[in-house]
Amino acid sequence: MKSQERHHLKQNEFAVQAARVADVVMQNRDRWLMIAAAVVVIGAIAGGYLFMRGRAADKASAAFGAALLIEGSQVVPAPTVPGAKQQPGTFPTETARNEAAVAAFKKVADEYPNDETGRAARYQLAGLHLRSGRAAEADRLFAEAANNAGSSLYGPMALLGRAQALSALGKFDDALKILTDLSGQRDSALPIDGVLMELARVSERAGKTQDARAAYKRVVDEFTQSGYAGEARQRLAAIG
């Protein structure tokens, strides 16, 4: 997560917890956005064998890209000079930016529900709701994204997001079941060390210290070069 994003997320406890989703999926959020965009482009190319289908894919990709740009727009305070207008491509508050991004991603998800672009948009939409503290809606959207993902990378990503949403709602047993299943999928697109860290963190929040200890220990023992290994050692020392 970028430091500026972390600073904004500290203002909301749900958002703080939600930030871990991005940390687990990949330590570099931009990389996942690039992957998501690449998947969309591949889907557009694959559909190009028919002209009309190609045009639809192009429109979907363009709409998804525009939504991503909104999500990544700068927050610039509204001008106080009389007659001055908001700088193009910026939003006066993070809330305003998030609402615009939600609307943009929802439009793509609704218009292209059964192709890769719609899946990507639904996943992004769920993440926005989670970071905004709307965990119940995020859970619903992540569940939809997981059910409609097919064999794409959005399946495990959406399940991970759903586990975090359930944890935010206090449904720890449901969250832990998902995380336990994900941690056992060695061929998953997700980094297992990151999944184990999330499993350990949620176990701690649920008061399951022994389970948390076991997950942290797996990170230390099985992923010695992981960027999470240091944190796992610290947590093991803290919980005894």
Image (tube, rainbow, N blue to C red):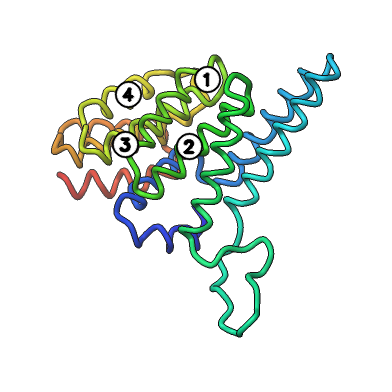
- State the count of labels: 4
The amino acid pointed to by label 2 is: Val
Circle 1 is placed at which residue position?
Answer: 149
| 31, above or below 149, in the image | below
Circles 3, 2 touching at the beta carbon (< 8 Å) = no
Q: CA distance from mark 1 to mark 4?
A: 16 Å
The amino acid pointed to by label 3 is: Ala
Residue 210 appears at what percent x and percent y?
Answer: 15, 33
The amino acid pointed to by label 1 is: Ala
Q: Indicate which disc residue 178 carries.
A: 4
Circle 2 is placed at which residue position?
Answer: 25
| 29, above or below 138, in the image | below
Q: Earlier in the sequence, mark 3 or mark 2?
A: 2
Instruction: Work out which quarter of the rendered image holds the C terminus and state it.
Output: top left
Q: CA distance from mark 4 to mark 2?
A: 15 Å
The image quadrant of residue 165 is top left
Q: Of tags 3 and 2, which is closer to the observer?
A: 3
Circles 1, 4 touching at the beta carbon (< 8 Å) = no
Circle 3 is placed at which residue position?
Answer: 136
Q: Earlier in the sequence, mark 4 or mark 2?
A: 2
Task: Identify the residue at horizontal 44%, vertical 24% (top origin).
Answer: 144
